[in-house]
Image (cartoon, helix red, strand yellow):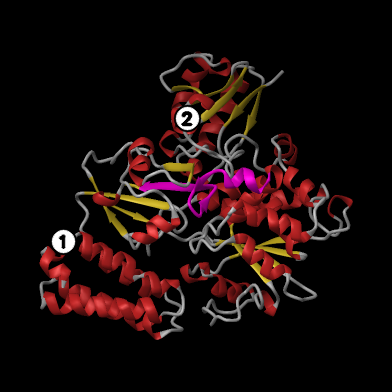
Amino acid sequence: MSIKVYVPRDSSALSLGAHDVAAAISAEAQARQQDIQLIRNGSRGMFWLEPMVEVETAQGRVAYGPVTPDDVASLFEADFLHGGKHPLSLGLTAEIAWLKKQERLTFARVGITDPVSLDDYIAHDGYRGLHNALKLSAAEIVKQVTDSGLRGRGGAAFPTGIKWNTVLNAPAEQKYIVCNADEGDSGTYSDRMIMEGDPYVLIEGMTIAGLAVGATQGYIYLRSEYPDALHILNEAIDHAYHAGYLGENILGSGHRFDLEVRRAAGAYVCGEETSLLESLEGKRGLVRFKPPLPAIEGLFGKPTVVNNVISLATVPIILDKGGEFYRDFGMGRSRGTLPIQLAGNLKQCGLVEKAFGITLRELLEDFGGGSASGKPIRAVQVGGPLGAYLPESQFDTPMDYEKFSEIWAVLGHGGVVAFDTSVDMAKMARYAFEFCAIESCGKCTPCRIGSTRGMEVMDKVMSGQNKDENIALVRDLSDTMLNGSLCALGGMTPFPVLSAINHFPEDFGLDKAQVAK
């Protein structure tokens, strides 16, 4: 019987040489006449250990990492195929503390299964949610999602059940499900990991969404920089069609749902749902005025559910185990779990799925292992390039939508980027304006003009010109962008700018008294 050896095909692992490691293992096994089955799984999310190789043994899966092609011969010499000891040994994968401390619901299969094997997906509880959904009415499916407390994981945190209910009750002959997979925030990669590591959970979630609102067509609007995800999604969709999980008669139920992947336009602003819809229709990605909401008039003017990858990928476990099961995780109005992505100046970058309520400090220290440089962590940006910069005094804030709102910050897509004491926060504030200026769709004046003027004023501040007057001008400009922009791109640019000024005034040559003005 062949021994199962797992080498990730996740983009992060590939960037660190996973393909070469897989080839070396295959060649070495052949040379030694060892019978192995090489399986390309998703990443477990511990990127500092990638490429991480796992071997199926009688005791369970045993991990080794980070492995290079040069390590392969010595792994065979150490009998790693039977869990032998080696300097790269990590022990039983399930017992690795970093993984054991998590609550993996959405990511339950990522790193465990072969991403494109439908049999593997079903063997690990896949499609149980869809089977349950086929026994329910559309309103009952929506109620399960509503009862779970699931909110949008793309940034706005709008209750998913309410959005679905709006589309369900909107009269139309054609409705759509659109997955926003244009993951563009710095320090975020959970969407990519799901699409590359467990694509069927997204396909299943979108199919359930179609049943819930009466939509028969779905589109995955995929970030153009994700070629591996594109290949894996298309292969998985093809398998789902052939097995009857997609198409005109899903599992003989009489329900239809078709799904295809569309590549994004390569613009950050197309992550905004109305700009995304414009792009999906073949137009330039410009933000639409609201109302009407996409739930009423969305893609091609029809009622449309627009949800993030993580939101849709979480639906199967809710329909499998029930809304109350999912609601039991979390705190306050933030129910369930959030896939948190650790990036920046940290020893251990990777994906952590935890119930809402864990503090930023716990994430940085217990999971991130502190800064990679050894210097103190000075600032953390949560929620992408438009998220606020949080100082050390706010590291004990729980990961909770409302708690973050109280300190004028956002959780967004769950990206956490750490900076040590070498960071210049004035430069980071200027970068926020620059980012907005480059990525603005140009439709509204506050964003288009405000971001460019902001860069110019920040240059004056940084060169020491009339600091008091120019800081006051930055604040006025931020107020205009915050309250006058058509979408969150211009409306959230003030978050990193003002938080940098308020929490790190010394980097702008200011004292606290000047900031208080």
When asked about the image quadrant of residue 160, the answer is bottom right
When asked about the image quadrant of residue 288, the answer is bottom right
Note whether residue 234 is visible: no
In the displayed orientation, state which residue is furthest to the front.
332
Look at label 1 and name its amino acid: Asp
Q: Nearer the viewer, mark 1 or mark 2?
A: 1
The secondary element bearing badge 2 is classed as: helix
Query: Which residue, given by chain and number where applicable, does mark 2 sit on?
Result: 69
Look at label 2 and name its amino acid: Pro
Position in image of residue 9 (x %, y %) = 57, 41
Which residue lies at the image location 55% right of the left edge and 39% below the top edge? Answer: 104
Compared across the picture, whether 412 is left or right of 285 comes to left
When asked about the image quadrant of residue 489, the answer is bottom left
Compared across the picture, whether 335 is left or right of 464 comes to right
**Magenta-colored stretch includes residue 409:** no
Label disc, if present, on residue 507 of the rendered structure: 1
Front residue of 5/189: it is 189
Label disc, if present, on residue 25 of the rendered structure: none
Which residue lies at the image location 55% right of the left edge and 58% below the top edge? Answer: 151
Magenta range is 322-343
Question: Which of the image's four quarters has the C terminus?
Answer: bottom left
Q: Earlier in the sequence, mark 1 or mark 2?
A: 2
Position in image of residue 376 (x %, y %) = 22, 43
Position in image of residue 455 (x %, y %) = 26, 75
The secondary element bearing badge 1 is classed as: helix
Front residue of 241/408: it is 408
